Image (spheres, rainbow, N blue to C red):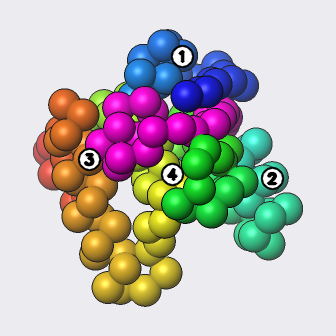
Amino acid sequence: MLVTVADRQRLLSVGAPWLERLIRQVLAVEGVGRAEISLTLVNDRHIGRLHAEWFGDPAPTDVITFPLSEPAAEPLAGDIVVSTETARRRGREFGWGARHELAYYVVHGLLHLTGYDDTSPARRRAMRARERAVMRAVGLPAPPRRPAARKA
């Protein structure tokens, strides 16, 4: 299994070994035996440029997945780009840590590579349920998706 992590941002300190281990754990949970996965950490400006180039939307987003193989292929191959700036901001909104939010984006991206999509309400519900199950399976809390209550 080939897993590479490139850190192209300075907003959030996250160790590559932790992310590599997370990717391997998620792939194992999904039954993937062979894979070539790259993960790149960027800021909102960078992911906004990619989002504009590939999807015609210049707004920053949380994660972009570039499949380089079919979901059932051996090896499974793909590139995942995540915004640590978005993870930090959204983590605060949801009342949990930026690292957990970042892990959620990695899980989401990997599930896209394995064939899940969120293009319809039914598929989105199935993907969200799988995300929660995978997060629990790798020892992380399930992602809260309601904003945290604000303190007065």
Q: Position of residue 69 (x, y in %)?
A: 67, 57
Question: Can the viewer see residue 13?
Answer: no
- Spatial CA span between label 2 and label 3: 30 Å
Q: Is residue 17 left or right of residue 69?
A: left
Name the amino acid, label 1.
Answer: Ala
Q: Which residue is mark 2?
A: 49
Looking at the rendered image, the disc whose residue lies closer to the viewer, 2 or 4, is 4
Please give the label number shown on residue 109: 4
Disc 1, SS: helix
Name which residue lies at 75% across and 70% down. 55
Name the amino acid, label 3.
Answer: Val
Residue 34 within the magenta-colored segment of the rendering:
yes
Please give the label number shown on residue 16: 1
Q: Is residue 96 left or right of residue 18?
A: left
Q: Position of residue 138 (x, y in %)?
A: 24, 34
Q: Which residue is mark 3?
A: 134
Name which residue lies at 52% across and 60% down. 72
- Spatial CA span between label 2 and label 4: 18 Å
- Spatial CA span between label 3 and label 1: 20 Å
- Spatial CA span between label 4 and label 1: 17 Å
